Image (tube, rainbow, N blue to C red):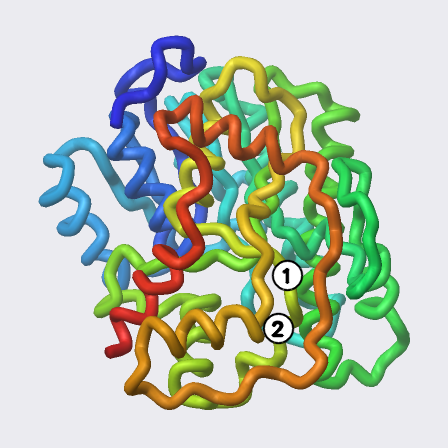
Amino acid sequence: MPLPSDAVLPHSSLVLVTGANGFVACQIVNQLLDCGLRVRGTVRDLQKSAWMQEHFDNAYGPGKFELVKVDNMVEEGSLDEAVKGCAGVLHVASNLSFHPDPNIVVTEAIALVKSVLESATKEPSVKRFVYTSSSSAACQMKWNEAFDLTSESWNTTSIAEAWKPPPYEQDRALHVYNASKAQAEQFFWRYVEDHKPHFVGNAVLPDFVCGAPVSLEKQGYGPTGGILYCLWTKNDMWKMLPTQYMIDAKDCALLHIGALTHPDYQNERIFGYAHPKRWTDWIARLKKMYPTHEFPDSPENEDYDMSKVLGQHRAEALLKWLGQPGWRPMDESIKEVFDLMV
């Protein structure tokens, strides 16, 4: 699928993707290549990620994708070489350890985005920078209450909970992760405002990402797919995630490409909130899709996410600009994942 004629990056432009072996990042790499762009992906271990080189060479031909090793992206200047000659930078890498100590997780997340921004600022070829944030950076942790979710919304609840005094128990981990995404994104916008770099910056905030991995054999189900596997196997870990929105994995990748290449999207938070996701509804859908499989009972009196996402239309417009009719239907995304488990 070639990029539209008014895209700000020409065909065969080189794009850097950090943490390219991750579930979302690998989806982005796949779609970038499909759009006719070249990709340089950073990983910590070239040997473990060698399958990507073979996979994308076979799919798109040699010379379109390359892996580079960056041991410690937090280290100043660690990405200076990787970003050379790149027209765009997609910073997707993140701390997914779910460690409960904010001094570890939040501090690293901020240091990561700082390092990538500084390297991009040194490289005059960079035209666009896209930061992969998360719905958890903006969500209000409110349920059964109608409110507007806007570009000014921040998850102040998780930030406050994350930075409460120790001990750092495991029940704090989700708040710490949320705070890491919120505070790293806040740093990103402060940097853009204070330093006024020569490139345009955008952020993508996807909610629950649902879809098959690029390689199930090499990647597993991914973080969100792993939660769905728990639902399939009746492991109660799926209950740790509340009601929220969801987005298809390909749609998520395309939002990043739109943020990278659309001429009119500049300094925007792009909300990847495609469809409301409620476990009660999903379990009912799954029972119809797989009538012979035994699923857990729906949660009792499950909450509703009643937020109105005011920027949702801007995200959907990006998909249409890239040639899609709109959001991928939710049932298609769900079935794509669960068919792997049958």
Tag count in the figure? 2
**Quarter that holds the N terminus:** top left
Q: Which residue is pictured at 80% across the width and 68% down the height?
A: 162
Three-letter amino acid code at the position of disc 1: Gln
Q: Is residue 14 left or right of residue 54?
A: right
Q: Quadrant of the C terminus?
A: bottom left
Residue under the point 75% across and 66% down: 103
Q: Position of residue 128 (x, y in %)?
A: 52, 23
Front position among marks 1 and 2 = 1
Three-letter amino acid code at the position of disc 2 = Leu
Q: Picture quarter containing residue 341? A: bottom left
CA separation, marks 1 and 2?
8 Å
Give the vertical position of 102 relative to 88 (above or below): below
Q: CB under 8 Å between callouts 1 and 2?
A: yes
Circle 2 residues within 10 Å: few <14, some 14–19, many ≥20: few
- Residue closest to the eye, 203 or 149: 149
The answer to whether residue 175 of the structure is visible from this angle is yes
Disc 2 is placed on an element classified as loop
Residue 33 in which image quadrant: top left
Residue 328: x, y in percent? 40, 45
Query: Residue at (32%, 45%) from the top-left corner?
Result: 68
Q: Give coordinates of residue 204: x percent, y percent.
A: 58, 40
The residue wearing badge 2 is 241
The residue that mark 1 highlights is: 244
Please, what secondary structure does the residue beneath circle 1 have?
A: strand
Up the image or down, 286 lies above or below 149; here it is below
The one nearer the camera, 147 or 132, is 147
